[in-house]
Amino acid sequence: MPNDTQISKFMSLVLRHAPEEAGLVLDDSGWADFGALCVVIRQKFGASAADVERVVAENPKRRFAIDGNRIRAVQGHSVDVDLGLMPSPPPAVLYHGTKEEFLPAILRDGLTGQSRLHVHLSMDIETARVVARRRKGKDVILRVDSAAMSGNGMTFFLSDNGVWLTNQVPPRYLHQISKRELP
Ligand code: HQG
C-alpha cells in the first residue's frame, strides 16, 4: 500500500520546485502532464493513477489541482510560474508564523519569498502557528497590516487552497504578537 504522505511530498517537490527530478516539464501556468507524472509515481511508489487522484482529492491542504489530463500545485512554487491568480482585496489583518532566529532579518528586510515566488500569509493565528511549528526553534507570530499595504497599492492573491500570497511585506507593516496577546 503506497504511503500517501510520501507521494504527496514527492508531488510537491516535482510540481513546485524540481520537475526535472521526474523528467516533467511545467508549462507557464505550472501544469504538468498527469499521465507522465503517474508513470513516474508508479515506478517510484508502485502507486496507480487512481492513487494519485486519491492523494489529490484527500490532500488536507488541497495542494494540487487536476484539470483534464493535467495537474499542478496550486501554490508554493519556487520555479517561475504564473498561476493566473487575480488580485483580491485581503482581510484587514493577516498573520505569518516564523522562527525567532529569522526575526532580526525579517524586521530589517521585511518578509520576502525566500526560495518561493510569494510570501505566504495565514488568515488566522492558529494556522500561522502550525506553519511556524514546521521548523525547530522558538515560534514567532507576526501580524501583517494588510489593509494598510493594500491601501498603499500592494497586491494580494488568494490561492485556490486559501493561502494569501503577496510579493513582500516591508517591515513597517509587521507587528510581533506578544505571548499575552496570543489566544
Ligand atoms: C522566513 C507550507 C529571513 C519566513 C506552510 C519562513 C505555508 C525570512 C522562511 C507554506 C525573511 C521561508 C510557506 C527574511 C521570510 N529574512 N527569513 N527577510 N522573510 N523569512 O517554507 O511561510 O505544506 O518558504 O518567515 O504551511 O514558512 O508546503 O515559507 O520561515 O503555507 O503546502 O523564511 O509552506 O505549506 O520558509 O511556508 P518557507 P513559510 P505546504
Image: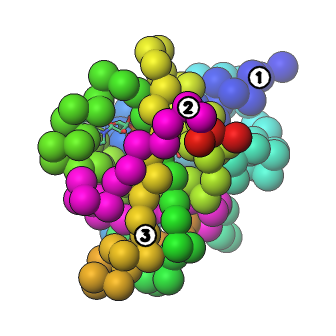
**Residue type, mark 3 in image:** Ser
Q: Does residue 51 sit above or below 88 in this rendering?
A: above
Give the SS element for disc 3: helix
> In the rendered structure, does residue 16 fall within the stretch colored magenta?
no
Q: Residue 6 at x, y = what percent?
A: 64, 24
CB atoms of marks 3 and 1 within 8 Å: no
Q: Is residue 38 visible?
A: no
Q: Element type at marker 1?
A: loop
- In primary-sequence order, the first of circles 2 and 3 is 3
Depth order, front residue of 3/106: 106
Q: Which residue: 62% across, 46% down?
A: 125
| In front: label 3 or label 1 | 3
Q: Mark 3 — residue?
A: 146
* Residue that carries the numbered disc 2 in the rendered image: 179
For residue 68, which quarter of the picture? bottom right
Q: Residue furthest left?
A: 108
- Say if 63 sits above or below 153 in the image: above
- Name the mark on residue 2: 1
Nearest to the observer: residue 36 or residue 103: 103
